[in-house]
Structures are given as structure tokens and as C-alpha cells.
Image (cartoon, rainbow, N blue to C red):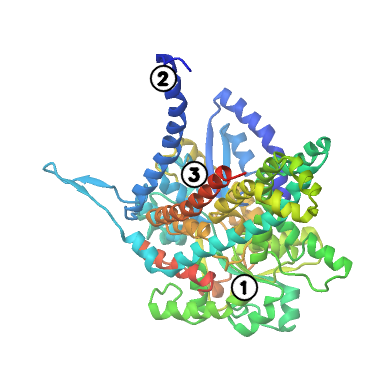
Amino acid sequence: MTAPPTHSHRLSRLVNIGIPYLWLGLFFLLPFAIVLRITIAEPALAQPPYTALWEWVGDGMLQIQVNLQNFILIWEDDIYLAALLNSLWVAFICTVFCLLLGYPMAYAIATAPERRRMILLMLIILPFWTSFLIRVYAWIGILKTNGLLNNFLLWTGLIDTPLHILHTQSAVYIGVVYSYLPFMILPLYANLTRLDPTLLEAAADLGCRPFRAFLRVTLPLSMAGIVAGSMLVFIPVVGEFVIPDLLGSPGSLMVGKLLWTEFFSNKDWPLAASLAILLLALLVVPFVLMQRLQTRIEEGPA
Amino acid sequence: MHRILSGVRLLIPLCLLSVIAVGHAEEQVHLYNWSDYFAEDTLSGFQERTGIRPVLDVYDANDVLEAKLFAGSSGYDLIFPTARPFAARHIKAGLYLPLDKSKLPGLDKLDSDIMTSLAAIDPDNAHLVPYMWGTSGLGLNLEKVKAALGEDAELDTWGLIFDPEKAAKLAGCGISLLDDPTEVFSAALVYLGKDPNSLDKADLDAAAALIKAVHPHIRYFHSSQYISDLANGDLCVAHGYSGDVLQARERAEEAGKGVEVGYRIPREGAALWTDVMAIPKDAPNPTAAHAFIAYLLDPKVIAAASDYVFYANPNLAATPLIDGDLRGNPGIYPPAEVKQRLFVPAERGDAEIRNLNRLWTRLKTNR
């Protein structure tokens, strides 16, 4: 039995629990409250470009202005819903591609000899040494009509007219999958290296073929890694702005781009804030579902 | 691409330099200007003359500048917005510091036509000094356009973009439009023979239908990417700013790959715009900003800038100092009969701009 909690024990517990909460409050709740407050304002030709929440109108009267028009506009104008759905769809497709590409890579790294693992991991992390923006710009050079890929394909004779890849939806998929692949590989790798290899030996001893052993043993046990990797890819891709803006077609309607337009071109901060809040609300749903799935996997029967 | 990489390599010594600079508390002036809008030696010349170190940030759309300005405490001393509708709106919102004209002795040399026009949005020219002016027209890959439409095709018409038949033939080698609803709508309206500044619903619907009809042939909507794409031969028709297209022509010549870029002001009419200098009211160093404006009012300095960026400047004393080729270029200094066909973008209310922008998003995404 431990000794009854002393004063210093309680203090250290308070600090241990307090710091994460303070962090959350300062860097999530406070900005969230500010954004929430802007959603109920009206755009105005002023600095900052929205109306004040309250105003003293004399005689001790406090007038509070709440404008719900933004949410009504988003609801009534189908372009916002279309953008949200399209962003979710793009994020879903990219997550699937990242998983299909990332799983074999993570598996190969996890089963490689110890000495080579570090080198392979380094190769995954190495691109982060270059700025994300520059790596996306590099794809412009690769994919454009007069670019590396087309010139190579023309040189090999595989095609005789250059392919239009840049400024299409395919370019967005390529850019996103490329950029987010490491976020899928790293949690999967962490998960796969923890798996007990004797389980596979036992399966083989009992006459299970390797592929079946993978499906029945490795895959279910790596579910937690799959969920973590998918969340790390799916959630940021929904709000992605840079890649669709640089590589996408004018028709690629994504919520990040729409947010930009409302914020920059329209100077409609309240509407932009409302969109951001809706996006957040929409992302909480898959996040909670996946979180629940992950807890069930971890607690479930081994 | 190349520029960015070399930029990164420059970054490390620059960071060290700025640390040293802070240590010395050297006087600085923070400029926020369009990309590629000074001559190569404009900034170094200012530092030599005044000892004040200019720090430059760049943007490629008025929107980006505006967002920073409206958010407040931008930290910039001097900015270069387009007069209409942007600077006009900023004046209404009270975002600018009135100029101290006693510190700007070169003001009297500026073109009085331009100053009168600016006084309509800035009474007594209290806040704005014009920097450069230009037009929005067509940047063409001459060889490819002629190959697609025939040797004697008319090139000075918005029909290259808005006539679906021609656009279909040009789509293969690439058409781009500016990512700016005011610019594109006024071009479509003027092609239809209507008032380019019309906000009439029937007119806007007609323009929207026109843009929709050619939408499948548009490769992208962007306000700066067309410069390198024209120069590389990746585009054959670009709706673009005069000086930017001429910069593309220069780059194509330097590259020597046989790409010949031309600029045309469409005969139906084109937008004439003026970029101005203004000091934000929360500028950290307005005195240095005045010094920088005074420096740019020097005919020699502004003539060198025009020579480099291919835009006309409003300084009449500078005109004789400008390179003869440039002065004779009808794309930069349009002859009188072309100038008659140019129109000035109108001021717009916030609600009108929002409606136009939302219509624009819908059009771009084909909904």
C-alpha cells in the first residue's frame, strides 16, 4: 500500500493534470472561443472587419448583437455542403491510398533486419527536412505539360502527346498521398514492430499459410496502428488548402479553398469562422468514432 | 522553383544578418509590394541614399494584402494596392495615414490626368501616390495561337477566350484566366458589348453564361502562374496584366527556346488600372515610408523600375528617361486611339463584391 497522499503529492498531481488542461485551454479552447465569437458577428468595413459583440448605448443599456445569418447562408447555399462533402470524399480516397501504399512499406520496414530499419526509417523522415511548400512546388515541375514526367514518357515513346495531370483532381491525389504517406507509415511501423513474432511461428506450426496468418494474426493486431495512421491522414486532409490550390483544377472544390475565399477575397470573417466551426464539428464525429474503435481494439480480447 | 530554392539558401545568412541588424538597431522600412515590382537595384539604391534598410515582402493578389491590413498591426510602412476598388475601400475604412506632402517634393511631376482620376476616390489626393499603371489584356504564344487558328487570325480580341469555337481550338495548348472576378466579369461584359462595370443582374447572368460556356477550355484560374507558363510555352492564351506578360516575353527570349510571347489590348476594350502607394495608419515608421515615396518620385529611379518591370509610371519627368523600346511599345504606352477604349474599374460596395465572389466560386467549380 502506498502512504496517504501528502501535500507535495497532491501538488505534483495538480501540476501533472493541470498542465495539459492549461495547454488545452490556452491553445484550443481560447482560440475556439474567439472564432465562435466571430461567427455571430456581421462583416463590417472596419479594422478588424466585423461588428462588435456588445455596445453600450447609454443609460447603462448594454446591447448585444448576435447574427445567425452565416449559418443560415451556409445551410441554404448548397456550395458549402458540396465543398464539405467533396473534402470528406477526397480525404477518404487519399486515406485509402495511403493505407494501401503505407501498409506494405511499414511492414517491410518492421520486418527488415534491425540494422537496416534505421536507414529505412530515415528515408521516410528525410523529406521533412525540406519545406512542405517546396516539395509541393516540386510536383508542379514533375507533373506539368512540359515537366519531368511528360518529357520522360515522351522520350520512352510510351505516349506521343503530353498528359494533362497538373491542375486536375489526379494531381491533388498524387500531392496529398505523397505528402501524408509518412503519417500513415510511422504509426503503422510503431505498431508492427511491437507484434510478437512467435504468434506467426505458432500459426505456421499449426499449418497456417503465411498469407492466411497475415490476415488472421497480423492484420487484426495492427488495427490500432491502422486507425491511428488513418486519423493522422484523414483529419488534416479534409481541411487541406495548399495542395489543391497549387496542384488542383479550378473545379476542385474543397472547404479549405472556400474558407480562403471567404476570408481573403470576401473579407467575410464571420462566414469564414462559421465554416471553420462546422468543419470542426464535422471532424469530431469520425474522430470520436475512431477513438472508440481504438479503445475497443486495445481493450478487446487478445 | 529555382527562385525558391535559391531563396532558401539565402535564408540562413539573412537570418544571421537580421540578428546582427537587430543588435545594431538599424533603421528599417517595411515594404509590402507585388512580386517582381521593383528594379533589381531599387532597394539597394534607397539604402545607399538614406541609410535606411528596406525590408521587402511580396504578394500576388490584393486580397492577401487586404486581409493583413484589415486584421491590423500588419507591421508594414508602405504598401502598393490597386487604386480601385481596393485603396478606395481602405480610405473609406480609415486605414491610411494622410500624407505629409512637404516631405514629397516630386509630387508636382505626376500626370495630372491620373491625379484627377485618383482624387475621385481620395479627395485632395490626401493618401495615395500613384506608382505604376497598366492594362489587363491578352498574353499570347504567337506561334501556337497562329498554328491553332490560322496565320491571319485576329489576335486583338477577347474572342480568343470567350468565343467557344476559338477557345476549343486553343484549349489544347492552354488558356488561363486571372483568378479575379472583377477582371474576368468586366472582360466578358465588354466582349458582349455591355458596360464592363455593370452590376445589372441580367448582364451578370449573360457574362456568367458566357464564362460557363468556355469553362471546359480553361486550364486554370491564377493571377501569377501564367508568367512562367507563357515563357515556357506551357500556355498559349493568358488573361493577364500587361507588364507581367511582357516580363514573360523577356524571360522567353532569355531562355532562347523559340517561344515568342506577345501582349495585345483587345479592341473591345480592357481595364486600365493604377497601383498606388499608401502608408497604413499603424505603420511603425511613417517617416521612412515618406522617404521611400520621395525616393520613388525621383524620375531616374522610377524610370529604371519601369525599364525593369515593363509597366508605365505616372511620372512625366521620367518618361524621356525610359528605354526607347518601352516608350514605343503600344502594350505599355498605348496610342491615343487604344487608350480611348480602356475603362476604369468602378468602386463596389462590400455586399456587391461578396455576391460577385460567390458567383465566381460557383463558376470556377462549375456549379
Which type of secondary structure does the marked residue at label 2 adopt?
helix
Identity of the amino acid at label 1? Ile
Alpha-carbon span between mark 3 and mark 2? 56 Å
In the rendered image, which residue does mark 3 sit on? B78
User: Is B173 in front, or is A271?
Assistant: A271
Front residue of B349 and B124? B349
Drawn side of residue B67 relative to residue A161, left or right: left
Residue at the (53%, 30%) spot, across then down? B27
Instruction: Compute the Cα span from label 2 to label 1.
Output: 67 Å
Circle 1 sits on which residue? B218
Residue A10: mark: 2
Judge if badges 2 and 1 mark residues of a common chain.
no
Check the image and name the residue furthest to the right. A156
The picture places residue B53, in percent across and down from the top left corner, at 58, 34
- Looking at the figure, which quarter contains the C terminus of chain A? top right
Inter-mark Cα distance, 1 to 3:
36 Å
